[in-house]
Image (spheres, grey):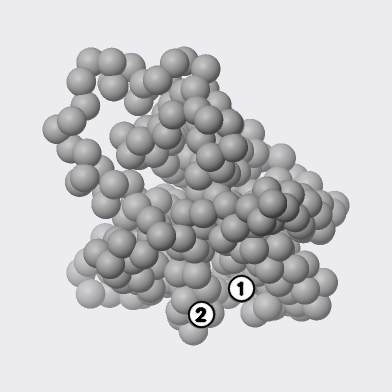
Amino acid sequence: MTVFNLLLVALIQGITEFLPISSSGHLILLPALTGLADQGQIIDVAAHLGTLSAVIVYFWPDVRLALWGTLRLLRGKIDTQGAWLAFCLLIATIPVIVLGLILKITGLSDAMRGIAVIGWTMIIFGIVLYWADQTGAHQKTAEKWSLKDAAKMGLWQAVALIPGTSRSGITITAARTLGYNRTDAARLSMLMSIPTIIASATLLGLDVIGTADASALRDIGIVMAMSFAAALLALTLMMRLLRAVSYTPYVVYRLGLGTVLLWIAYT
């Protein structure tokens, strides 16, 4: 791939991964609408690792707490805030891993990679996000995350395997319906992305292990660095904007893009 293609993929992945507008949908649309070559799974893995690094850096205090908690959890103890956070993240990740494996084995994941599917999911889940954000309560904070809420958000997260849904968008929607305020809904969504991205990157990595050569390593480095920078910038801006505005601008974008995609798909 050319450097331009790599930068384009990295920027799209980095910017859209944590915004509620679907990174996977945009990456599928890139070759479909531009005629550029598909980036392939190696580049997908690199882009995911870049965005993973960004969310770890941005939410490092929470990540460090969960890491120490994981050590307690491995010893069978859930007696600290970190261990509880790690346990909730584990429960929230199970549905997407199970459904992801089912879709991969059956081949349904490839069958859903169409412009029409992305158009409909952009519109439908954009409307759902708007409804949840406008009607949801604001009394819950991330520190009060319960196991029941983690399980519910995990089930919603599994729906994001449908291209165009948006993993961050659907988990933020779930959190808002459960009464979490806008900032903490995004915070929980981002923390949930860490084990999910690790699982996704591992699954993709197993398919391409041993196929990388010297040029591929260069491409991987470029994509990881650029997707990290783009994701960190997008995260920072979104978290700051949420203190003053709602999720409506993202909903408007989803509705507009979805309408254009449906027009393309059916004409």
Q: Is residue 238 above or below residue 68?
A: above
User: Which residue occupies the foreground of this view, 122 or 117?
Assistant: 117
Q: Residue farthest to the front?
A: 267
- Quadrant containing the N terminus in the rendered view: top left
- Place residue 69 in its image quadrant: bottom left
For badge 2, the amino acid type reads Lys
Q: Residue at x 58, y 31 (%)?
A: 34
User: Which residue occupies the foreground of this view, 188 or 21?
Assistant: 21
Q: Residue farthest to the bottom?
A: 148
User: Which residue occupies the foreground of this view, 29 or 245?
Assistant: 29
Crowd rating for badge 1 (residues with CA inside 10 Å; few <14, some 14–19, many 20+): many
Q: State which tag comes first along the sequence, 1 or 2.
A: 2
> Gap between marks 1 and 2, in whole Å?
8 Å
Q: Residue at x 56, y 60 (%)?
A: 117
SS at badge 2: helix
Q: Residue at x 42, y 34 (%)?
A: 38
Q: Residue at x 33, y 39 (%)?
A: 41
Q: Which residue is mark 2?
A: 152
Task: Estimate the x, y position of residue 111 in percent, counting from the top left.
Answer: 41, 60
Q: Which residue is mark 1?
A: 174
SS at badge 1: helix
Task: Estimate the x, y position of residue 153 in percent, counting from the top left.
Answer: 52, 73
User: Which residue occupies the foreground of this view, 266 or 197?
Assistant: 266
Crowd rating for badge 2 (residues with CA inside 10 Å; few <14, some 14–19, many 20+): some
For badge 1, the amino acid type reads Ala
Q: Is residue 57 visible?
A: no
Contact between marks 1 and 2 (CB within 8 A): the answer is: yes
